[in-house]
Amino acid sequence: MCKHLPAISMIGFLMCCNLAHANEACLLESQGTMMGIKLDIKDCIQNAGLAGENFKAQCEGMSQAAVAMGGPAAKITYLASCPVPFQAKCDNTKAAKTIYFYYKRAADEAAGIQSGCELMQGVYTKGTFD
């Protein structure tokens, strides 16, 4: 029997767990009025390397961010991956180990999404804006 088998099995298990984190996403949806502006938000965060508990905390924090500004908390739905097609994507895997997807945004918001992405040192990808 190979004496390295337990170590090899453990490495395989750890690699499997890391891949599992890469297949996590949270879809954030909210409708309401915040600071006098009517909002219909549908955004998604794809995990690209965060530990599961850190990723969940990030999703919950983003959901509650609107509450601090007087809006409703976003509904969180956990998915295997973010839906496609998207309007815009910010790949922020280097700094934040996440990829942000944007849906239901007005075309005039694209420039703001792109500049915000670049400020976070992310890579912006334009999808389809209606």
Image (cartoon, rainbow, N blue to C red):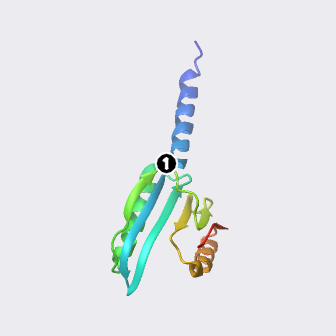
Quadrant of the rendering where the C terminus is positioned: bottom right
For the view shown, which residue lies furthest in the bottom direction? Answer: 36
Helix, strand or loop for disc 1: loop
- Classify 96 as above or below 1: below
Q: Quadrant of the N terminus?
A: top right
Image vertical order of residue 111 relative to residue 17, above or below: below
Q: Determine the image quadrant of residue 121.
A: bottom right
Circle 1 sits on which residue? 80
Q: Position of residue 85 (x, y in %)?
A: 58, 60
| Residue 19 placement: quadrant | top right
- Residue at the image point whose x is 39% and y is 69% from the top: 30
Residue under the point 58% across and 63% down: 86
Q: Amino acid at mark 1?
A: Ala
Q: How far from the left and from the top, in percent, is residue 124?
A: 65, 68
Q: Residue at x 56, y 32 (%)?
A: 12
Instruction: Report x, y in % for residue 32.
Output: 35, 77
Q: Is residue 111 above or below residue 86?
A: below
Residue drawn at (39%, 66%) of the image: 63
Q: Residue furthest top?
A: 1
